[in-house]
């Protein structure tokens, strides 16, 4: 059990740092002193004496082993009954075996205690939307939270949802760090901005009537959602070109997180696959949010510069984690033995191989065991394919790599598991491909021919890449175009409608065969069906609308009961397009309820 804060003095002493920090309560006030490790102890004791007397004084009387404050209180450090010399360097005086004595009060010395380095609260605090403080900890594994309104304690949770009662007022939150040994550190308090009135309604509010929590033991809700990474939403190019119709404040991180904080838990999904999840967004917002709602999560950052990746959350009351893993599709293609045949077929085109090996796309896979029927394990793959509008050929290959990786994980698991275990594959994500193109056809049919017209995208894509490279080398690309050159995820949003029309009209002719890449035949053995049907769109911007997101489930192992309908089109275009002040992403969440056979 942790000792009272009033009987502890905290000392931060980190190797390779020149100073130590000493923290303790003196006369009810928290005192923090940063001192040199080599400074003699007597100087720190003098400072403590000054603080204890509550006023500064000159000409302190120095003693060899201890100090007396102005009010006559004896201040010293004892070691095994002996007083530590005042000439002892701080680094040897402030040890856990020693005791600081101030008059009749003894302080146990705690080295490197659990510490709150800082607490940040979003500038956007709306009634009806979760507030999740971001906390930086040192020497701590967790912390205790408490929320207060005026002098009333509201709750002891990390996440709090203010109500209309709090509008116009500030809330107060306290954070107490705790070490793995149960030692409590100094409690830090933070005040929120004034709570403002929340939105009367968001775009997805009408969908929640279709997503009550599932009670049936053999039914599960699967969700996939590209939440739009903060990294892309806050680019100036996004504000000026991609989403000029969206109010700038609605693209701010704090505002969009508020909307997500209300939306995601409201779907009551058992398995939630998210794409474009920011590194910081996951760690400081989504993970504590979903943890408070009974979920566990796994996150994997994309390989490369972009600070975003994929995340899977699962309902801990229904599922347990067996395994989580992820792979760079580029590295998987190049280095895994299961792809030797594929790599050899692709090597005939150096430009194609180069394009594939420079992409940051990954495939995330988790194995989740059904708590009720433990012989059933979900193998869930989550991905976000390259979004360049002319890269159909690359998306076909990336899809094949995802399927091969999912199959490899399943095979390895079955090798170690009992023969009676039934594995149920699920393939989710933002595929950046409409149903009329090869990716959708391949996943559902299980094969694609070498003469499929989408292989012709190679020529158009490589021609564009070559032109861009020449302009870049000549210094003729604008700053925005250079940004696009380095980010396929942003480039994928540009002129998509035009690109799709070009593909329909000009790339369906097999007469325009490529000399360097004739296309390849691919096959897979999964029995997938589309679990979410074909809505009007899953992505809606001013420049493009269409279906890019899918949830594929195994038709031989599950039955799709129903899927989540879209909000009304009038509500989607209420603010021109997405994202908007009522919706945080340019995508809409998709979901389906499945029942196990």
Image (spheres, rainbow, N blue to C red):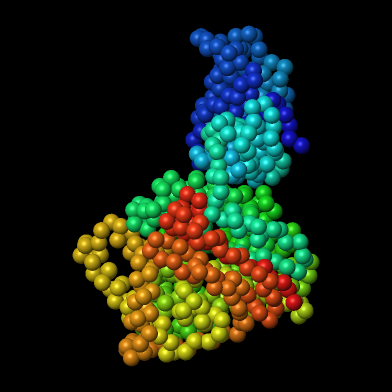
The residue that appears at 33% across and 59% down in the rendered structure is 483
Q: Against 466, is 567 above or below?
A: above
Q: Is residue 352 above or below residue 362?
A: below
Q: Is residue 531 left or right of residue 548?
A: right
Towards the viewer: 451 or 36: 451
Taking 75 as reference, is 404 left or right? left
Residue 261 higher or lower than 547, as above or below: above
Out of 61 and 213, give the one closest to the viewer.
213
Q: Is residue 117 visible?
A: no
Residue 350 appears left or right of 412 = left
Quarter holding the C terminus?
bottom right
219 shown above or below 525 = above
Q: Which of the pair 566/120 is nearer the observer?
A: 566
Q: Quadrant of residue 192?
A: top right
Q: Nearer the viewer, residue 297 or 442?
A: 442
Give the x, y percent position of residue 508: 38, 85
Q: Position of residue 354 (x, y in %)?
A: 37, 75
What residue is at 71 percent from the left and 58 percent from the top? 213
Observer able to see residue 343: yes
Expressed as whole percent of the image width and height from the top left, the position of residue 27 reads 64, 18
Q: Quadrant of the N terminus?
A: top right
């Amino acid at each position: 059990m942790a000792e009272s804060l009033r009987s502890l003095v905290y000392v931060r002493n980190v190797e390779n740092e020149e100073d130590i920090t000493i923290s303790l309560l003196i006369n009810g006030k928290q005192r923090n002193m940063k001192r040199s490790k080599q400074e003699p102890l007597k100087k720190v004791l003098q400072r403590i004496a000054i603080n204890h007397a509550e006023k500064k004084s000159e000409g302190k009387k120095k003693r060899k082993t201890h100090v007396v404050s102005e009010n006559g209180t004896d201040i010293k450090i004892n070691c095994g009954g002996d007083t530590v010399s005042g000439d002892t360097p701080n680094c040897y005086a402030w040890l856990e075996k020693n005791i600081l004595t101030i008059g009749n009060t003894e302080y146990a010395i705690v080295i490197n205690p659990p510490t709150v380095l800082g607490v940040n609260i979003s500038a956007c605090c709306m009634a009806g939307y979760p507030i999740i403080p971001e906390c930086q900890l040192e020497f701590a594994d967790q912390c205790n939270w408490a929320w207060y309104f005026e002098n009333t304690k509201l709750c002891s949770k990390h996440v709090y949802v203010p109500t209309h009662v709090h509008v116009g007022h500030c809330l107060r939150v306290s954070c107490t760090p705790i070490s793995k040994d149960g030692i409590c550190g100094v409690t830090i308090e933070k005040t929120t901005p004034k709570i403002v009135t929340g939105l009367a309604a968001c775009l997805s509010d009408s969908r929640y009537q279709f997503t009550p929590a599932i009670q049936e033991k053999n039914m599960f809700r699967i969700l996939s959602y590209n939440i739009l990474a903060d990294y892309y939403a806050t680019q100036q190019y996004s504000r000026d070109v991609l989403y000029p119709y969206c109010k700038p404040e609605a693209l701010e991180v704090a505002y969009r997180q508020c909307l997500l904080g209300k939306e995601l838990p409201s779907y009551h999904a058992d398995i939630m696959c998210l794409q474009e999840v920011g590194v910081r967004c996951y760690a400081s917002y989504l993970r504590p949010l979903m943890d408070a709602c009974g979920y566990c999560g796994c996150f994997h950052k994309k390989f490369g510069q972009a600070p975003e990746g994929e995340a899977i959350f699962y309902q801990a009351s229904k599922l347990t984690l067996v395994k989580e893993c992820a792979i760079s599709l580029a590295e998987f293609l190049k280095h895994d033995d299961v792809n030797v045949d594929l790599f050899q077929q692709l090597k005939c085109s150096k430009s194609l191989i180069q394009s594939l090996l420079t992409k940051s796309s990954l495939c995330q896979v988790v194995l989740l065991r059904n708590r009720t029927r433990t012989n059933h394990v979900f193998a869930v793959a989550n991905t976000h394919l390259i979004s360049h509008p002319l890269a159909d050929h690359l998306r076909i290959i990336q899809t094949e790599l995802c399927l091969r990786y999912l199959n490899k994980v399943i095979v390895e698991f079955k090798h170690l598991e009992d023969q009676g275990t039934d594995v149920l594959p699920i393939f989710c994500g933002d595929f950046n491909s409409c149903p009329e193109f090869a990716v959708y056809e391949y996943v559902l049919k299980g094969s694609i021919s070498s003469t499929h017209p989408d292989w012709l995208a190679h020529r158009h894509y490589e021609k564009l890449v070559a032109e861009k490279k020449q302009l870049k080398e000549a210094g003729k690309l604008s700053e925005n175009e250079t940004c696009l050159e380095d980010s396929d995820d942003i480039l994928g949003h540009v002129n998509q409608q035009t690109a799709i029309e070009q593909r329909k009209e000009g790339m369906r002719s097999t007469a325009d065969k490529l000399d360097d890449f004739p296309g390849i035949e691919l096959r897979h053995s999964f029995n997938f069906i589309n679990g979410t049907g074909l809505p009007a769109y899953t992505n809606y911007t001013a420049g493009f609308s269409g279906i890019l997101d899918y949830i594929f489930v195994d038709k031989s192992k599950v039955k799709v009961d129903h899927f989540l309908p879209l909000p009304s089109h009038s509500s989607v275009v209420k603010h021109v397009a997405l994202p908007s002040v009522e919706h945080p992403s340019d995508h809409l969440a998709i979901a389906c309820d499945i029942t196990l056979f």
